[in-house]
Amino acid sequence: MLRSREEAIVVSVNRLLAEKGFETMTMDEVAADVGIAKASLYKHFNSKEELAGAAMIRVLERALEQVDVLERDGPAREIDRLKAMTRWTLDLQLAGEMPSLPAQNSALRNALIANKAYLDRLMRLSDRLGAWITAAQSAGDLNAALPPELVLYTLFARACDPVLSLLKVSGNLSDDQIAEALISTCFDGLTGPRR
Amino acid sequence: MLRSREEAIVVSVNRLLAEKGFETMTMDEVAADVGIAKASLYKHFNSKEELAGAAMIRVLERALEQVDVLERDGPAREIDRLKAMTRWTLDLQLAGEMPSLPAQNSALRNALIANKAYLDRLMRLSDRLGAWITAAQSAGDLNAALPPELVLYTLFARACDPVLSLLKVSGNLSDDQIAEALISTCFDGLTGPRR
DNA sequence: GTCTATACACAGATAGAC
DNA sequence: GTCTATCTGTGTATAGAC
C-alpha cells in the first residue's frame, strides 16, 4: 500500500508536470491533487526535484517496456518501429501524461543530470533507439547523412513538441489526425513524401 | 536616452529569457545584468510579464523586418523564403537571442494573450508567412495535404526547438552544420530528400 | 505515516529620499 | 529616474503531536 500510494503520487505529478511544467507546479498542488497533506509528500520523496525525477523515470521505464513490446511483436523494419515509438510518445502527449522535458536550464535539469537512476534509464533507451536508427540508415530508410545523435534528439524532442498542443487547442483536427500529421512532418518533412 | 536605456533592458531580458526561461529569470538578475537598481526597472516596465512581453514584441518586429527584406531582396520561390526565415530563427537561437516561447501554460502565456501589441505583431507575422505557405503548397513545393496552420506552427516551433541546444552542447557539429541539419529535417524530414 | 502549524528563503513589487 | 530599504506574498521544507 506504500507502493500504491507512491504510484498515485507519481501519476499526479506526471499529469501536473505535463500541464504546467516543473517551475510552475507547486507541492501544494500535488498534495491537493493526491488528496494528502503536503508534509506527507515529504515522507515519500525528499524534494521536489526527487519527485519530478521519479516521474521522469517512470516515463522512461514505460518507454523501455514499449521498446521491448515492439521488438517482440512490432513491425520488422526498424524505420517502422521508430515511427511506432514516435506514435506512442504522441499518444502519451495527447493523453496529457507526458511531462514537459527540461530543455533549457532549470533546477530540474541540474537535478536530473545528478540522478543516477534517471541517467541509467535514459542511456538504456538511447542505446536501444540508437541501434534502430543506425539499422534504418543502413537499410536506406533514414537519411544516412544525418548524425545518429541528431536523429535521436529529434525523436526525443517530438515527445514534447509544442506543435501538438497548439493544434489541439485550435480544435480543427482530431487526436488521430494530429498524431498522423506530426509523424508525417517528422519523417517526411514539410515538403512531403513525393518530390 | 530613455529609449536607449529601455532598449538595453530589453536586450538583456532577451538573452536571459533565452538562457533560463521566464519562470527562472528573476528581476534581480535583469537589474544586475543591465547594471541598474531593481526599482529602476519598474520605472520603465510595470511588471515582469510586461517586460517579457516587450522582449517578445521586439523579436516579432525583427522577424517582420526580415520578412520585408526577403520579400524585397530574397529568393523568388516562397519555399526558399520560408527556408530563409527558418534559417534566420535558427541563427537567432544559436546567438542565444531567441527567448524560449511559452508553449505550456505559464504566467507569461496568460499575460501575452492579453497583450494587444504582442497579438497584433503575431497576427501580422502569421498572415505574412501564411501567404508564403499557401503559395508554396500551390506550387507543389510544400505538402498540400498538410493544413497551413500545421505548417505555420511547425515553423514557429522550430524557433525554439530544443534539438538545437542539445546538438550545441554535444559539440560535434559547427553552428552552420547544426542550422543546415535542422532545416533539412524540418523540410525534408528524417528520411531525407530522396526515396 | 498522517496531520496542523510554522520556519525559512526568495522573488515581485513599492516607499520615499535624492 | 536612480538609488537603498522594505513590504508582502508564496513556495519549499520541517517540527512535532497523534
Image (cartoon, coloured by chain):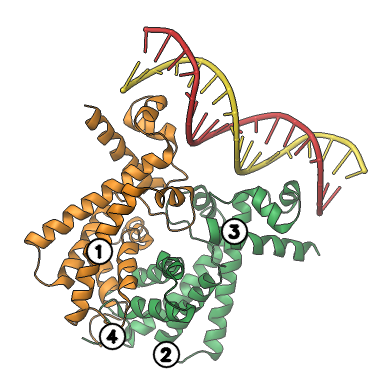
Chain colours: A green, B orange, C red, D yellow
- Check whether the beta carbons of the residues at disc 1 and disc 4 lie within 8 A of each other: no
User: What's the CA distance linking mark 3 and mark 2?
Assistant: 36 Å
Query: Which secondary structure, mark 1?
Result: helix
Q: Quadrant of the C terminus of chain A?
A: bottom left
Percent x, y for residue A65? Answer: 59, 78
**Amino acid bearing label 4:** Pro
* Both labels 1 and 4 in a single chain: no
Front residue of B55/B12: it is B55
Instruction: State how far apart marks 1 and 4 are (Cα).
Output: 26 Å
Asked if residue A152 lies left or right of residue A7, the reply is: left
Q: Nearer the viewer, residue A2 or B123?
A: B123
Crowding around mark 2 (Cα neighbors within 10 Å: few <14, some 14 to 19, many 20+) is few
Figure check: A46 above or below A195: above
Chain to which mark 4 belongs: A
Q: Could you tell me which residue is drawn at 33 percent across and 88 percent down?
A: A139
Does the residue at mark 3 contact the one at mark 2 (Cβ under 8 Å)? Answer: no
Pinpoint residue A145: horizontal percent, then vertical percent.
26, 76
Residue A16: give its label: 3
The residue where tag 1 is placed is B127
State whether discs 1 and 2 lie on one chain.
Answer: no
Q: Disc 2 marks which residue?
A: A77
Circle number at residue A193: 4
